[in-house]
């Protein structure tokens, strides 16, 4: 790296927030990668200075997963600078990756909302084509997610209840009480329901919950 390049890197890192440009948006190291090699999805976030969590794609669509896969690849090569929820998602989760669960390919760390179905019709559909990777009935819990187990393999984690989670997300006192009751800052195990319950607000938009709140409860 030349003396001039080192100076530019130093100037970027001197930013007080550490983002390299005082922006919440992901930033591209244009000295290392050509814009023509990037997808429209990534370029949209860079050009409009928007975080990846404010994507335009339907959550669960092919383009949605491709966006996170590309962001993960660029970040791992030090070609993309991210912060906030974007950084947490890239560091804490496997969003954008897929794995095999019960002989079916499923997206990892992507929360699905379980919906009520006619039991007889659901049983018939399951025999013909198991609805893996799609919203479905799943017992007493409201949400589920597929995660990697530390020792190998995939685990389905169900969590949540049916008592109005969206209202709780929008209530600051309820969020604070929930976080304290469940010790959210110390929940680090993705194979536990509490980890995902604590991070549910982060996926509010994905699940259709009316909330602009992001982070822990």
Image: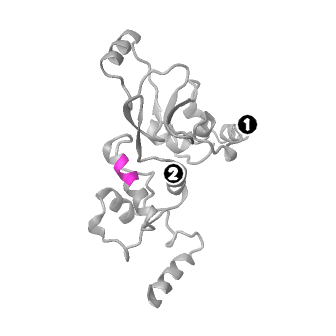
x, y percent for residue 173:
69, 40
Judge whether residue 19 is colored magenta. Answer: no
One can see residue 160 in this view: yes
Q: Is residue 111 above or below residue 49?
A: above
Q: Decide which of 150, 126 is in the foreground and name it.
A: 150
Q: Decide which of 16, 121 is in the foreground and name it.
A: 121
The outermost residue toward the left is: 36
Q: Is residue 67 left or right of residue 88?
A: left
Q: Is residue 35 left or right of residue 214?
A: left
Tell me the quarter of the picture where residue 118 sits. top left
Give the residues drawn in magenta, as a range: 65-69
Q: Residue at x 34, y 50 (%)?
A: 66
Q: Is residue 89 left or right of residue 133?
A: right
Marking on residue 181 = 1
Q: Is residue 215 left or right of residue 118?
A: right
**Magenta segment, principal secondary structure?**
helix
| Residue placed under numbered mark 2 in the picture | 89
x, y percent for residue 78:
45, 68
Q: Residue at x 58, y 33 (%)?
A: 167
Q: Residue at x 58, y 26 (%)?
A: 161
Quadrant placement of the N terminus: bottom left
Q: Is residue 185 above or below residue 1?
A: above
Q: CA–CA distance between discs 1 and 2?
A: 23 Å
x, y percent for residue 67:
36, 52
Q: Is the residue marked by circle 2 packed among few (<14), some (14-19), or many (20+) residues within 10 Å? A: some
């Amino acid at each position: 790296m030349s003396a001039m390049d080192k100076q530019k890197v130093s100037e970027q890192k001197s930013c007080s927030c550490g983002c390299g440009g005082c922006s919440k948006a992901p930033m591209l190291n244009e000295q290392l990668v050509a814009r023509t090699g990037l997808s429209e999805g990534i370029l949209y976030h860079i050009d409009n200075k928007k975080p990846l969590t404010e994507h335009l794609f339907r959550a669960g669509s092919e383009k949605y997963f491709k966006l996170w896969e590309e962001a993960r690849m660029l970040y791992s090569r030090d070609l993309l600078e991210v912060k906030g929820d974007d950084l947490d998602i890239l560091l804490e989760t496997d969003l954008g990756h897929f794995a095999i669960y019960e002989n079916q390919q499923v997206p990892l760390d992507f929360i699905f909302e379980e919906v009520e179905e006619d039991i007889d019709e659901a049983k018939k559909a399951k025999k013909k084509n198991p609805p893996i990777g799609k919203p479905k009935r799943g017992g007493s819990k409201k949400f589920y997610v597929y995660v990697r187990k530390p020792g190998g393999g995939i685990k389905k984690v169900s969590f949540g209840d049916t008592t109005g989670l969206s209202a709780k997300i929008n209530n600051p006192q309820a969020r604070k009480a929930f976080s304290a009751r469940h010790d959210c800052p110390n929940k680090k195990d993705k194979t536990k329901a509490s980890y995902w319950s604590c991070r549910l607000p982060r996926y509010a938009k994905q699940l259709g919950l009316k909330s602009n709140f992001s982070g822990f409860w």
